[in-house]
Amino acid sequence: MVVTAGEKKKGLQTVVFTNPPILTSWASIVGPKEGEGPWGNSFDRVLSDYLTGEASWEKAENKMLQEAVELALSKNNLLAKDAELLLAGDLLNQLASSNFAARQLKTPFLGLYGACSTMAESLIIGAMLLDGGFFRRLVAAACSHHYTAERQFRFPTEQGVQPSPSSQWTATGAGAVVLEAQGSGPRITAATIGKVVDLGQTDSSNMGSAMAPAAADTIKMHIADLNYPSDYYDLIVTGDLGIIGMALTGQLMVKDGLVPAPYYSDCGVLLYDEQQGVNAGGSGCGCSAVMLCGPLLAKIQSGEINKLLLVGTGALMSPTTSFQGESIPGIAHAVAIEMG
């Protein structure tokens, strides 16, 4: 049977998958600080240091992504050559980490940039390609490294600049998911592609509040497009708004008639504990990637969570636009992952 685009499109921004792609395996690698957090035992590998034997933090980041992809594939007894496509992204200019990892993996590659929403974006595009019959197996991945992001977006750590209490700690981590047209495991059942929302926030040290309106808008649209009750999901988790952005999103959800607690949390809040000195919480492409590929998918696999809505959030700014006084556009993409 031929399914038309109209049958897959629901409402204004949401698609449902006729043949829901399967998450058949996944892997997560994190840095030392992330390994010391509350979910340290849920990750496949914790790095002993931030260089991992490499000459620079940038080289360490692309090595981390490469190894996460290889580890996810190896759980299915597969090699990089067995993946038909790699969808990946990071925070660095020209997607340096993903590009160099793809160079080593020698897998057909599409580089993606959605800031911290990149993991959700890669899952959505991958699910569409599989459901459309264009591929049978691919890998969706994302990564970030605290020290590479600090050097690009803020200040080199050698300067010892005091961070603002509203700032977030860029996570060091890489997550990779093997998506297949057939197999067993959690399924991607639907996705909502977000709009760019910008309410004029210009403080690059408070990205959570800049992204919160986009997160709330996408969650509202997802629920409305699919005509779901507000408590349909066992957990709605954003990534990565941090403490401030999560609180604002919760308020906006209430305003929209949605009930946030206990069904709502944020990867930037979950990844660390309050004693780790991360100010408002975690951020970075790797934050939601490792939370998904670590504890969240483990909870789905165990049956503790049956229906998860991952809402990847991104601050679509650059150092150039910030220096020019531009506000910070926000984006959020939602991916529905269900078991059974």
Image (spheres, rainbow, N blue to C red):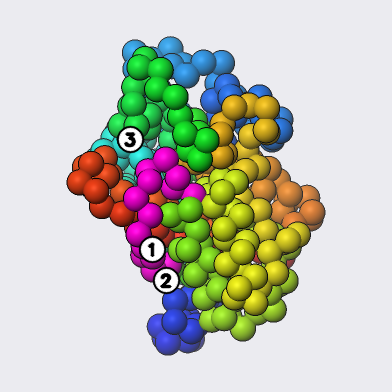
- The residue at the point 38 percent across, 29 percent down is 150
Q: Amino acid at mark 3?
A: Phe
Q: Is residue 295 left or right of residue 281?
A: right
Q: Main secondary structure of the magenta part?
A: loop
Q: Which residues are magenta?
A: 194-208
In the rendered image of this protein, does residue 153 appear above or below residue 151?
below
* Amino acid tagged 1: Leu
What numbered label is drawn on residue 111?
none
User: Mark 3 — residue?
Assistant: 153
In-image side of 289 versus 294 (left or right): left
- Position above or below: 92 against 129: above
**Please, what secondary structure does the residue beneath circle 1 have?**
loop
Residue 199: give its label. Answer: 1
Q: Position of residue 170 (x, y in %)?
A: 47, 34
CA neighbours of label 1 inside 10 A, class few (<14), some (14 to 19), many (20+): some
Position above or below: 149 against 8: above
Q: Earlier in the sequence, mark 3 or mark 1?
A: 3
Nearer to me, 187 or 336:
336
Task: Assess disc 2: are there few (<14), some (14-19) or many (≥20) residues with their C-alpha within 10 Å of its C-alpha.
Answer: some
- Residue 132 bears which disc, if any? 2
3 vs 1, front mark: 1
> N-terminal of the two: label 1 or label 2?
2
Residue 111 screen position, x and y as percent:
31, 48
Q: Which amino acid, mark 2? A: Gly
Q: For this rendering, which residue is in front, 177 or 201?
A: 201
Q: How many marks?
A: 3
Q: Are marks 1 and 2 in contact (CB under 8 Å)?
A: no
Q: CA distance from mark 3 to mark 2?
A: 37 Å
